[in-house]
Image: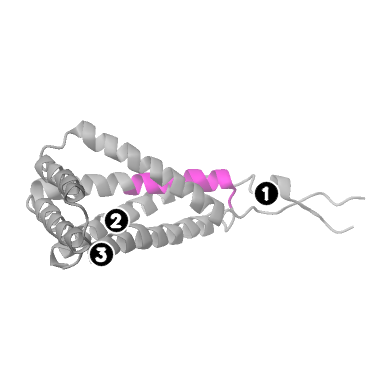
């Protein structure tokens, strides 16, 4: 009788390649850092509220998600083309965690020591566009004032961010990255068929 597939053991021999996950994480982190700087340098040149929102969504969410997915499938291919959900989750989350840490540290160093005026410039321009957009749409003054006050607090906080706040923000981001890793793991999971012994 021909061999039959035993799917219950599929992916059993798969292992986590931490080295490749770290390498891809570093590359993804650098890409994320560069994309973030690109956004901050482009935003002050935009002249509408929705163009700013669209840019941030497309780059921070769309482009990052696509690149992460490509890297996830590349990691699966490096693993022989197969991996279980568990292996996928551990591998992908390690990659995303490394990328998040690198992009966060890189961004903080850049805006606090290299170009200290950039962040304030971006927030100030965002405030102006927000006010303009809300006024055009007849948003009540109290709502406008509340939103502007929130943005102004961010401007005042520039240069005063503590390590505790950075780690708190990093922890929240990692939580979202874990959820994203769950999604990518479900999409990229591909169990390796294991053939049972032929029945005599």
Using the image, tell me which numbered label, if any, was put on residue 196: none
Few, some or many C-alpha atoms within 10 Å of disc 1 (few <14, some 14-19, many ≥20)?
A: some
What whole-number distance in Å separates the C-alpha atoms at marks 1 and 3? 47 Å
* Distance from Cα at disc 1 to Cα at disc 2: 34 Å
> Which residue lies under the disc numbered 1?
10
- Precedes in sequence: disc 1 or disc 3: 1
Question: Which is closer to the viewer, label 1 or label 2?
Answer: 2
Q: Is residue 149 left or right of residue 96?
A: left
Q: What element carries label 1?
A: loop
Ranked by sequence position, the earlier of labels 3 and 2 is 2
Q: Do callouts 1 and 3 mark residues in contact (Cβ within 8 Å)?
A: no
Q: Nearer the viewer, residue 141 or 15?
A: 141
The reply to whether the magenta stretch includes residue 32 is: no
Question: Which residue lies most toward the top here?
Answer: 164
Q: Where is residue 126 in the image (x, y as percent from the top left)?
A: 16, 57
Q: Which residue is drawn at 12% across and 58% down?
A: 128
Residue 92 in view in this figure: no
Q: What element carries label 2?
A: helix
Residue 136 at x, y percent in the picture: 19, 64
Left or right placement of residue 42 versus residue 79 in this view: left
Q: Which residue is at 16% across, 68% downward?
A: 47
Q: Name the residue under label 2.
A: 32
Dominant secondary structure of the residues highlighted in magenta in the image: helix
Whether label 1 touches label 2, CB < 8 Å: no
Disc 2 crowd rating (10 Å Cα; few below 14, some 14-19, many 20+) is many
- Residue hosting label 3: 50
105 with respect to 128 (left or right) = right
Name the residue rendered at 14%, 42% in the picture. Answer: 153
Residue drawn where x is 36% and y is 51% of the image: 25
Q: Give the range drawn in magenta.
A: 83-99
């Amino acid at each position: 009788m021909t061999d039959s597939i035993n799917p219950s053991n599929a992916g059993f021999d798969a292992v986590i390649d931490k080295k490749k996950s770290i390498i891809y994480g570093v590359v993804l982190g650098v890409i994320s850092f560069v994309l973030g700087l690109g956004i901050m340098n482009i935003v002050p040149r935009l002249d509408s509220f929705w163009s700013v929102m669209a840019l941030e969504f497309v780059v921070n969410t769309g482009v990052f998600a696509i690149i992460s997915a490509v890297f996830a499938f590349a990691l699966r291919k490096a693993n022989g083309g197969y991996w279980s959900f568990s292996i996928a989750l551990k591998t992908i989350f390690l990659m995303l965690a490394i990328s998040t840490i690198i992009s966060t540290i890189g961004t903080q160093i850049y805006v606090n020591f290299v170009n200290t005026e950039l962040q304030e410039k971006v927030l100030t321009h965002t405030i102006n566009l927000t006010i303009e957009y809300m006024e055009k749409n007849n948003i009540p003054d109290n709502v406008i004032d509340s939103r502007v006050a929130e943005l102004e607090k961010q401007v005042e906080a520039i240069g005063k961010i503590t390590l505790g706040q950075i780690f708190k923000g990093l922890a929240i981001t990692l939580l979202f990255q874990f959820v994203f890793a769950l999604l990518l793991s479900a999409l990229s999971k591909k169990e390796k068929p294991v053939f049972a012994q032929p029945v005599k």
